[in-house]
Each structure stands twice: as structure tokens, then as C-alpha cells.
Image (spheres, grey):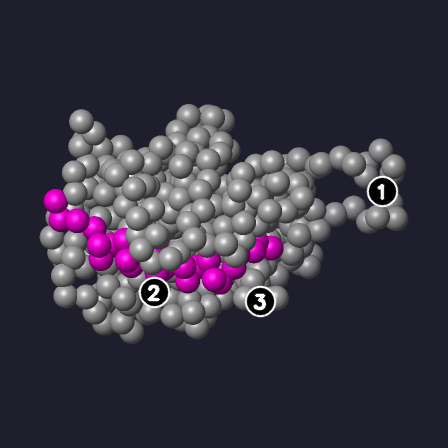
Amino acid sequence: MIERIREDTLNLMTIAGLSGHENQVRKYIKEELKKIGLKPIFDKFGNTTVTFPGTSPSVMLFTHMDQLGLIVRKIEDDGFLKFERVGGVPEKILPGQAVSAISKSGKPLSGIIGIKSHHATQPEEKYQVSSYRDLYIDLGMGSAAEVRSNGIDIGSPVVYKPSAEVIADDKIIGTSVDDRAGCAVLLEVARQLNSRSNGPEVNIVFTVQEEFNLRGALPVAQKIKPEIAIQIDLLLASDTPEMRDFGEIKLGKGPGLSMFSFHGRGTLNGVIPHPVLVDHFEQTASNESINLQKSAHIGALTDLSYVQLVEDGVASIDVGFPIRYSHTAQEMCDLKDLVGLAKLLISALNSLPENINLIRD
């Protein structure tokens, strides 16, 4: 299991897949599901679903395949690109960042977000964060015509230059750990469920456009109409010096549950997990001797925030793995946490009672 999760995570991290441009990620997932003997289905948004028939309750187990990044807004006459942000891209890390612009053919073109030479930087500039609208991407090309002849146009996707490597005791660092690591975990869950003989109906879904507006999962959720929704994503690690007051999540100490999430900047949404599901995952972790961490914080959301509101409501819970340096070009997770998460999910699904009471009475 550990080797498969490691390989899938590293492979997926090197594939560019901006929100709305997930084609190559979807292709990899499709091929891996075919190797298992599974035939996924796709909707008009690009969500990818594989269903394991079973008894009630019906479960939607999902994670997102897209990543945040940039999109070309304007091509200057001298070949520099102006851009918009797609998702929560922190402006303070953009200058000097290596990027890949994806051409119409899918070919990645290397570039850099321009930064003023240190030797020309004035003292008052050294502690300023530039607005992304004042920045530009340099592809090393000298004209707009050259840029366009290489397949880059208005609307072309741009991502942090993909990278992935293993360091120090199975720590994984690189681009789009959020949430290609989650995709790798669900591929392993699919492998394990494919050999089961009974259990609840499980719909494993790899969703799109989570980083864009959190609503890409809605079409597939409206079709499935699940009784239970389990979403897989990152949990913010709070074991580095700048994060120690944020919570108790530690890298390498196991998967975790989100007990509360909320985002107040425009969205006014979040998730408070269903208590029956919290109890079930706690009991499962205890039975399997898996250390289960807990998180509660504001400032972050997942697409579960909207899936939970489908039809007459869905019993929901966010389950995840610790991550450091989220939304940067060098995110970090621990392979042991991913393996623990896969084992937790498989056991929780296999032990889900057919008569589980989800009505809050």
C-alpha cells in the first residue's frame, strides 16, 4: 500500500491541472482506475466517479483533483504576460516564482514571475508586498506574436512549476500536495473496495474546480444524492514556529477529523461534522489503533460546504491529512499520514452499519 500511495502522489504532483483545466490529471486517474478493472464515468464539468454498489446508506467519498494557480489576462507587445489569480494564491510568494504556462496542445512552457533585481531595489521597497496586478510572467520570449505562436493566449492556465520529491523519512514536498495526495489515497481506497463482497454503496469522486469556487462537486452530488458525504483534503499542520498557536495537528502523527471549519470572507460557509460520523470515525480509529488528530479553525473551506446542502441535507464530515505550507509551491505532507488515512477510510466504510441513524432527533 505505501509504495502505491507514494508513487501515485509523486506522479500526480508533477501533472499540471489548474481549476477548469484538469484534463491531464483526470487522464492519469482514469488510467489507474482502468488498471484496477474499474470504469469511471464523467460529467460535463469533468468530475470523475466510480461506483461500488451496495446497501444503504449511500456514501459519496470525494477529493478534488484541481490545483490553484494563475490565468493569462493580457499579453504585452514585448511578450510579458499579465495574469489573474485562480484560487487562494498568496501574493507575497509570487515574485521570482518559477511557473509553467500550459499551451493549447498541453505542452508546459517554463517561465518566471519577474522580480526587480536586488541590486536595484531601494530600501523602502524591501519590505513591501507587490500586488499581483503589478507583476508579470516572463517566458523568455520577445514578442506577443512569439508567445501566441507557442500556444499561449488569453485564458491559458499557469501553475507553479511542478515538482515532487521525498525527503527525510518519507516526507513528500512539492507542488499540489493539495490535493493530489488525497487523490492518491482514494485510488488506494478504490483498489481495496474492488475486492470486497458486501458493504454500503460507495461513490468515489474526484472533483473539479474546488480551488476556484468550491462548487464543482455540486453536479455530481445532485446526481448521486448521497446520504453520507466524506470529503478528503488537507488539515493545516500547526507544528512549525509560526503555526503553533493555531491548533494541535502535527505532521506524521496520523490522519485527522475537522471538527469545525468556517470562512467569513465573502463565502460565509463552513462545515460542522455530523456527530454520528464523528463517533464512527473515532471508534474506527480506536479499533484499528490509528492515532486520530482533530482540527478546528477558520479561514479555510472545502467543497463539502456546499455538498452538505444537497437535497434535504447530507450527513457530512471532513477527513484529512496534515500539511505544511499550504498554497505555496512547496507544500509538505508525510506518507505515513496518507497510509493511515487510507486504512482509516477503508475500515470506516467496511464497518458502516446498514441501519445507521442519521436523523438528528
Q: Nearer the viewer, residue 179 or 323?
A: 323
- Disc 3 marks which residue? 169
- Disc 2 marks which residue? 188
Quarter of image, res 1: bottom left
Distance between mark 2 and mark 1 Cα atoms: 50 Å
First of labels 2, 1 by sequence position: 1
- Disc 1 marks which residue? 121
The amino acid pointed to by label 1 is: Thr
Q: Is residue 289 left or right of residue 166?
A: left
Look at the image and tell me whether residue 45 can be seen: no
Q: Which residues are magenta?
A: 330-355
Q: Disc 2 vs disc 3: which is toward the camera?
A: 3
Say which quadrant the C terminus sits in: top left
Residue at 33%, 69% (x, y): give it.
Answer: 32
Category of crowding for the residue at label 3, using alpha-carbon neighbours closer than 10 angstroms: few (below 14), some (14–19), many (at least 20): few
Distance between mark 1 and mark 3 Cα atoms: 40 Å
Residue at 60%, 66% (x, y): give it.
Answer: 167
Identify the secondary structure beneath mark 1: loop
Category of crowding for the residue at label 2, using alpha-carbon neighbours closer than 10 angstroms: few (below 14), some (14–19), many (at least 20): many
Distance between mark 2 and mark 3 Cα atoms: 21 Å
First of labels 2, 3 by sequence position: 3
State if disc 3 and disc 2 touch (CB < 8 Å). Answer: no
The amino acid pointed to by label 2 is: Glu
